[in-house]
Amino acid sequence: GYRVSLQGNFFGCNQTYMAFLEYNPRKHIKLDPPLNIQSNATASKCQIWWSVWNVPWYLAEILQYELQYKEYSMSWEVAMNTTLPSSLPQVEIEATELHSGIAYAARVRCKVSENENSYHSQWSEWSQTTVFKRADVPKVSEKILNIKTMQYLFIPLSFGTLLYLFWNCKLSQKASPALTFPRQLLSFSHYIVSTMGILR
């Protein structure tokens, strides 16, 4: 530890002011802001990463980071703040937290973790910003959508057709039971073949 005092001439008298009786540098750290912040946004998430400068390895392992991001056109006073749970210089933002087509700006700062007893620091200054925009979700083509719709409708339509044939055959058995059912079955077969052709 160190003893820190200030000396000066006040009103013609030399005076000494004791600032710290015992000053420990490791308890009064202020780190440089993170550097090289970059981002990559997709339709599902946004990845942000950065690096730190002039930080010893034993401090780099116990750092904590705070992420701040906002819509690019908005003020930082309304930005979202998140203290990251990991000391790794990276973070992911889920796409559900971002509006499609809107540009965002993000920045980070760092300090020694509050869970650390051997060192103590205040927050660094904020890093430079990185700008990103969530990618649009690709649209499903109309052809694929129609095929999926037909697949969902095929089973209930087939079941309904079978009920119709059964009921129609039962009513017409008195007239010509030997001829009606084969004719209805042939019509149903043609329906199945045509439907399978559509699904392909």
Image (cartoon, rainbow, N blue to C red):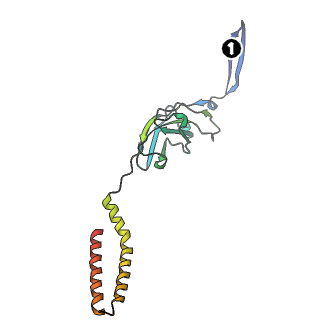
The quarter in which the N terminus is drawn is: top right
Quarter of the image for residue 186 reads bottom left
Which type of secondary structure does the marked residue at label 1 adopt?
Answer: strand
Q: Nearer the viewer, residue 81 or 61?
A: 81
Question: In terms of image quadrants, where is residue 149?
Answer: bottom left
The residue singled out by tag 1 in the image is 7
| Tally of marks | 1
Instruction: Identify the image quadrant of residue 182.
Output: bottom left
In the image, residue 56 above or below residue 176 = above
Callout 1 crowding tier (Cα within 10 Å): few <14, some 14–19, many ≥20:
few
Residue 49 % position (x, y) = 46, 40
Q: Is residue 7 visible?
A: yes
In the rendered image, the quadrant that contains the C terminus is bottom left
The residue depicted at 29 percent of the width and 84 percent of the height is 184
Residue 39 seen by the camera: no
Name the residue at 60% across, 30% down. Answer: 29
Q: Which residue reaches farthest top?
A: 12
Q: Nearer the viewer, residue 101 or 48?
A: 101
Q: Please name the residue shown 72% across and 12% down the image.
A: 15
| Image spot of residue 114 (x, y percent) | 62, 39
Is 24 drawn above or below residue 169 in the view shown? above
Q: Nearer the viewer, residue 105 or 11?
A: 105
What residue is at 36 percent from the left and 74 percent from the top? 157
Name the outermost residue toward the front.
175
Q: Mark 1 is on which residue type?
A: Gln
Instruction: Tell me where residue 51 appears, x and y as whole percent.
Output: 47, 36
Quick check: 141 above or below 32?
A: below
